[in-house]
Image (cartoon, rainbow, N blue to C red):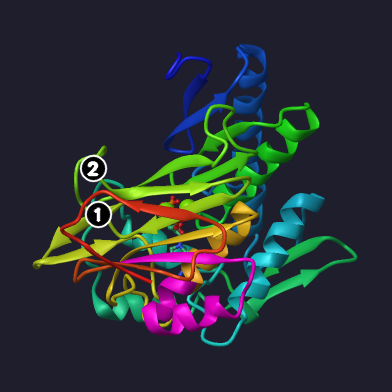
Amino acid sequence: MTTQPGVYGYSAVLMGSPILLKLFDSNPSLARQVFQLIKQQENLFTVNRADSAVMAINQAAGQRAVVVSEPVFELIRVAHAVSLLPDSAFNLTIGPVVKRWKIGFQGRTVPPAEEISALLRLTDPHQVVLDADARSVMLRQPGMEIDLGAIAKGYIADVVQAFLRQQGVTQALINLGGNVQTLGAPPHEPAGWQIGLKTPFASDDALLGVLQVKEKSVVTSGIYERYFLQDERCWHHIFDPRTGYPLDNELLSVTVIADRSLDGDIYTTLLYGMGVARGLAYVASRADLDVIFVTRDRQIVCSAPRHFRFQQQDFSWRLRY
Ligand code: ADP
Ligand code: MG
Ligand code: MG
């Protein structure tokens, strides 16, 4: 499939998302290797398959420690550390809450409040025991479940970027659905890759504007990706670990621009929990991160843009820096 002259686009559906790889040489065999790599990585981290490494840990919850491979241990170690940050909106043990809400699957309804508070007792990240020497992970309470859904795609996007680099590719884009990772810039657009920022709750091709980046990852997490409507409210898939309910603040989406897509994933969730005011103050102290918040009152709020440019397209939203 060719999208523009000289651009070779390869697509697949993996991890429940359409995946797009853009290259500047026709190389179907490289594309096949990339898609295989993604599938193999997904099989390590998914909780939708009984035989993944993460499921082995979950199935042994309350019973025993499970030895895992180096990359799995490392990703869990990072997720655990982020979960233990003060007032963190990220929680790697959110699994039981995510499963109960079933957002994006059949049979989703708002669970009774007593059930949610009972499940919250199974989401304490202090109850995860990591042993770096043994490379093992143990969940202390039966019923606890690790869910790496918020960061697996970012990790995998970085693995794909490293693989392409190692294959000598200098200009490429991989889009894992919400996680875009890039190498260099396209030959015909030296100013950078053009990455659309979706209009919340609109049709797929409606854009608020376009970001331009070089050799950066762009990660968006939005409440409009997976949700259902009940009692005139939007119940979405980013949970507040303190309440067990979907995060309820002024935000519709958070986009993070960073070198690593894993950081993009971590910080979209953390910044989601911080909201606009605290989030902007935080990002001002981080030279390596930029952020774009999209709010319920139709504003697009950007941090001082160090690593991207933004061209607004929909002027019915207010853009501010
Ligand atoms: P996706 O890229 O699939 O849309 P996101 O990156 O937006 O996913 O993260 C949402 C997913 O992260 C949820 O489906 C769930 O698996 C997991 N999750 C939800 N809330 C939290 C949380 N507070 N901390 C960590 N993981 C979460
Ligand atoms: Mg994601
Ligand atoms: Mg997302």
289 inside magenta stretch:
yes
| Image: 166 above or below 52 | above
Magenta-drawn segment: 271-294
Res 51 seen here: no
Q: Which label number is shown at residue 200?
A: 1
* Residue identified by numbered label 2: 206
| Image: 187 above or below 239 | above
Res 248 seen here: yes
Q: Which label number is shown at residue 244?
A: none
Q: Quadrant of ligand 1?
A: bottom left
- What distance separates the C-alpha of mark 1 from that of mark 2? 9 Å
- Disc 2 residue crowd, few under 14, some 14–19, many 20+, Cα 10 Å: some
Disc 2 residue type (three-letter): Ala
In the rendered structure, the answer to whether residue 155 lies left or right of residue 136 reads: left
Residue 148 percent location from the top left of the image = 56, 57
Residue 158 percent location from the top left of the image = 66, 46
Instruction: Please tell me which residue is depicted at 65% across the width and 38% down the height of the picture.
Output: 183
Residue 231 lies in quadrant: bottom left
Helix or strand or loop: what does disc 1 sit on?
loop
Quarter holding the C terminus is: bottom left
Helix or strand or loop: what does disc 2 sit on?
loop
Quarter holding the N terminus is: top left
In the rendered structure, the answer to whether residue 80 lies left or right of residue 244 reads: right
- Disc 1 residue crowd, few under 14, some 14–19, many 20+, Cα 10 Å: many
In the rendered structure, the answer to whether residue 234 lies left or right of residue 267 reads: left
Residue 251 percent location from the top left of the image = 30, 70
Instruction: Please tell me which residue is depicted at 43% across the width and 43% down the height of the picture.
Output: 195
The one nearer the camera, 246 or 224, is 224
Which numbered disc, 1 or 2, marks the residue closer to the eye?
2
- Name the residue at the right extreme: 133
Disc 1 residue type (three-letter): Pro
